[in-house]
Amino acid sequence: MRYPQHLLKLIDVFKRLPGVGSKSAERFAFQLLTWPKEKVIEMAKVLEEVPLKLHACAQCGCLAGDERCSFCEPDRAKTGFICVIASARDAFAIENTHEYQGLYHVLGGLLSPMHGMGAEKLNLDLLKQRIATLHLTDVVLALDSTLEGDATSLYIKRELDPLHLNISRLAFGIPLGSSLDYVDGGTLARAFLGRGRF
Amino acid sequence: MRYPQHLLKLIDVFKRLPGVGSKSAERFAFQLLTWPKEKVIEMAKVLEEVPLKLHACAQCGCLAGDERCSFCEPDRAKTGFICVIASARDAFAIENTHEYQGLYHVLGGLLSPMHGMGAEKLNLDLLKQRIATLHLTDVVLALDSTLEGDATSLYIKRELDPLHLNISRLAFGIPLGSSLDYVDGGTLARAFLGRGRF
C-alpha cells in the first residue's frame, strides 16, 4: 500500500530541510495531518512570504527584514573593521557576543571545488570595493576551522595582501568549559602554539 | 541583535513539527533562506494543498487521497476482520507486512486523561456501528505496548465484550534480530509468558 500522491509530495518537501531523512519527514507529514486546517494554511503562508519579507542586504549580504539593513549603519563603518563570515547567520552569533561593533561581509559559502564553490563565487570584488569606499583598515576572518575555512581564509588573505590591511583570524584553542581530556590532539596543538602570556 | 520579525515567525512554525526544537528550527529557517525563491514557494504550495488533497476517510479514519478510500474496499469487509489502530500511519505499516487483509479503524489517539484524551473522544460508537452493519466477527487491537495502549485496549475490550466477537491483541515479545542481553525485563517476562510450542 503506497501513500497518497500528495502525502509523498509533502514528505518530499520536508526531506529538503537539513538533517531531515525519510523517517523524520514522514513523522512531520503525519503530524501535520492531525493539525487543524488553519494551522497548516498559516504555515504555508509564512513560507510563501519568506521571499517577500526576508532578503539579503545588497551591500553586506546580511539578512535584512522589511526595513533597511541594520548591519550597514554608518557608525559601524567608522570603526574601520569589517568581519568576513560565511553565512548571514554568523552575524547574529557574533553580534550576541557584544565583542564587535564593525561591519560584516557575507561570503555565502566557503571554497569547496567539489561542491561547485570556486573562488569566483566568493565575490571578493565587492569586499575590496567596500574596503576602498569606506576606508576600512581591519579585516577579521571569522570562518570555520575546517579545511574549507582554512583554504578560504588563506585565499582571502592573499587577495587582500596588496591593500596593506590588518588581517586577523579568530583564535583557535580549547573551548570554554571543556576538560583537556576531551580535547582532540589538533586543537590542543593549536592551543599550545597560540598560548598567551598569563 | 534580534532576528527580523518574519524570520522569528518562520522559526516558530518549524518548531511546531514534532521533535524540532529552537536550534533545529533555526537551522531549517536559515537553510530555507538560501533556497531559490521557486523552491520556497513550492513548499508553501504543497503545504497549502494538504487540507484539500488529503483527508481522513469518514468511515475508517484512514488517510484518503483524491480518490475514494482504498482501506474500505468491500473485499476487506468480507474477511470479517477489523483492526483497531491509533493513527492513520499504522495502517500503512500493517499493510506493508502483508499479513492482514481486513478493515481498519483509526481511533485518532489513545486514552490519556492528562492530555485531554478521554473515552468519549475514541468514538467507539462508529466502531460498534461498523461491526454491526458489516457483520464483522474479529477485532484485532493493534495499539502501542505502553500504559496508554494497555488502558485503551482494555477499555475497548470491555466495551465490545457484549457483542461476542473474537478480540485479539498483537503479541508481545522479543523483537526480531535482538539479543536476549539487550531485552528489558518486562519484555522478557511477557515473551516468557507468551511462549509458543516449538
Image (cartoon, coloured by chain):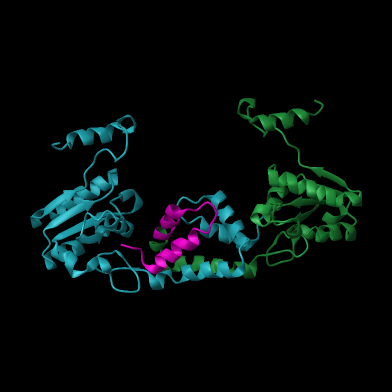
Chain colours: A green, B cyan
Viewer-closest of B129 and B96: B96
What percent of the width, then of the height, locates residue A75?
84, 56
Residue A10 on the magenta span: yes
Question: Can you tell which quarter of the image residue B29 is in?
Answer: bottom right
Residue A47 on the magenta span: no
Q: Which quadrant does the C terminus of chain B fall into?
A: top left
Give the residue furthest to the front: A114
What percent of the width, then of the height, locates residue A95?
72, 49
Question: Can you tell which quarter of the image residue A3 is in?
Answer: bottom left
Instruction: From this view, report whether residue A67 is shown above or below residue A88.
Output: below
What percent of the width, then of the height, locates residue B160?
14, 55
Region in magenta: A1-30
B121 left or right of A169?
A: left
Q: Magenta-highlighted stretch: main secondary structure?
A: helix
A166 left or right of A180?
A: right
What percent of the width, then of the height, locates residue A91?
71, 52
Instruction: From this view, report whether residue B97 is shown above or below residue A170.
Output: below
**Residue in the image at 38% along x and 61% along y:** A34
A66 left or right of B149?
A: right
Number of dots carrying numbers: 0
Viewer-closest of A54 and B120: A54
Question: Can you tell which quarter of the image residue A146 is in?
Answer: top right
**Residue in the image at 82% along x and 48% along y:** A157
